[in-house]
Image: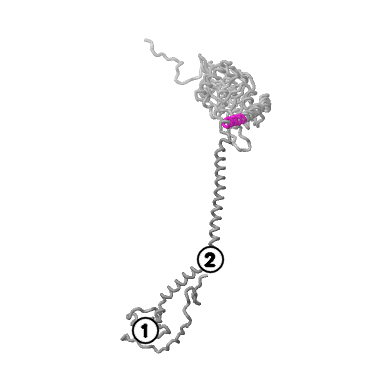
Amino acid sequence: MPDPYPYDESARLVAEEIAGDNALALSVGELSLKLKRMVEGEFGHVRLRGEISGYKRATSGHVYMSLKDENAVIDAVMWKGAANTLPFQPQDGVEVIATGRLTTFPGRSKYQIVVERMELAGAGALMALFEKLKAKLAGEGLFARERKRPLPFMPPVIGVVTSPTGAVIRDILHRLEDRCPTHVIVWPVKVQGAGSAEEVAAAIRGFNAITPGGPVPRPDLVIVARGGGSIEDLWSFNEEIVVRAVADCTIPIISAVGHETDTTLCDYAADLRAPTPTAAAEIAVPVLADLRLTVASHRQRTERCARRYVERGRERLDAMARLLPKRDQLLGPQRQRADEAGARLDRGLERRVTLARGGLDRAGAALRPAVLERQVERGRDRLASTWRLIQSLNPDRILERGYARITARPGGETLSSAEAARAADTLTLRFRDGTVDVAVDQAGVERPAPRTYDKPKREPKADQPRPGQAKPDQPTLL
């Protein structure tokens, strides 16, 4: 019976070199190196057409992605220097033509293309990228109408973002000078090629960052301008970085990129799109001459309105004056009353003078000598009668008939009772011809005080004055 497991020399446990075998064993590294040299030597320059997938830019600046079609996928890498020169922003789903060289990556046993230049695969791919980016930014609301701001009527300062050497800036300055001279600040940028989008975005953000009242005046309006060209020439103004800078700017922006038929995403984000840079200058400022004509027209209309108002007021005043009564009709009754009052005044004055004259005559008649003498005699009689009354009421007059008046000392008040006399220390008895001082003892008996009598007074022997004749101390009525 044959052996079911015959010995096979090819299935040895330990590898041995066989004489005449030229297939020497290679290391993995040696094979990878051979493959790398062969691939790079055979495919040192290739152009691939494919769709971008898995686009990613590392923090180092290098770009990693894949290029695919309906049959295969190949990894791609683009180093930082080449990535910075891309004229567009790559995105997934965009069909491109990549130019570079094939190489291998031994670490993972795969091959890849090192892209040195990348372009969009025709205008269709470019428009597809345009529409895709437009839909993305529109979904974020960057093109919404409510974000649009009104432009200032006459901006004192205008900022322009454009190339300093092109015809665009000269057209803008010339149009502004013709319409309404204003202060213009130009921020020079590249408007085409690698790095142009970054420069335009930086210029817009730079204008927006200017502080009001600083050494550089802050623009009241910004114009982003570029001349006409193909969609590839204008692609910098379709870049996302530029669109977001326009949308974030707090200063009103006019987008004037290309000609009337050219449209960029910057136009959608701006507050207003101008068909040409020259049209942007016309939109930015009014015509100064037209303003002066308008002001003059308003002044004339104002003056005409004022004159018409005065004329209408005069007409209404004249109409109302015709309806009013005449002056004589208004003042006639007052004049008549004034005349009557004047006449009554004259008569009243005459009467008053007559009455005064009569009173004066009567008073003058009363002042005649005979009347005055009678008045004097009546006055003298009344004075004599009054004097007799005074004499009759004199308390010392009764002393002539033998009575005495008792007064107390000190004080001299007249006593009218015995009790009051007992209470006094010394009494004075007043007689017709003098006084006598007496003392009061305990028993109430009066005894003369050691005092001499007053010298007797001599009575006048002359007859008493007749009525009407005044005594020396008697007042005389004149």
Quadrant of the image occupied by residue 199: top right
Residue 241, given in percent of the width and then of the height, sits at 56, 27
First of labels 1, 2 by sequence position: 2
Looking at the image, residue 230 lies above or below residue 431: above
**Residue pointed to by mark 2:** 372
Locate the N terminus by quadrant: top left
Magenta region includes residue 350? no
Would residue 130 appear left or right of 383 to someone viewing this image?
right
Q: Secondary structure at mark 2?
A: helix
Q: Secondary structure at mark 1?
A: loop
Quadrant of the image occupied by residue 148: top right
Name which residue type carries label 1. Answer: Asp
Quadrant of the image occupied by residue 313: top right
Q: Residues within 10 Å of mark 2 (few under 14, many from 20)?
A: few
**Residue pointed to by mark 1:** 425
Residue 274, given in percent of the width and then of the height, sits at 60, 23
Q: Residues within 10 Å of mark 1 (few under 14, many from 20)?
A: few
Q: Main secondary structure of the magenta part?
A: helix
Marks counted in the figure total 2
Which residues make up the magenta segment? 306-321
Q: Residue at x 56, y 55 (%)?
A: 357
Q: Is residue 109 visible?
A: no
Report if the CB atoms under discs 1 and 2 are less than 8 Å apart: no
Residue 193, given in percent of the width and then of the height, sits at 62, 23
Out of 86 and 100, give the one closest to the viewer: 86
Looking at the image, residue 315 lies above or below residue 469: above
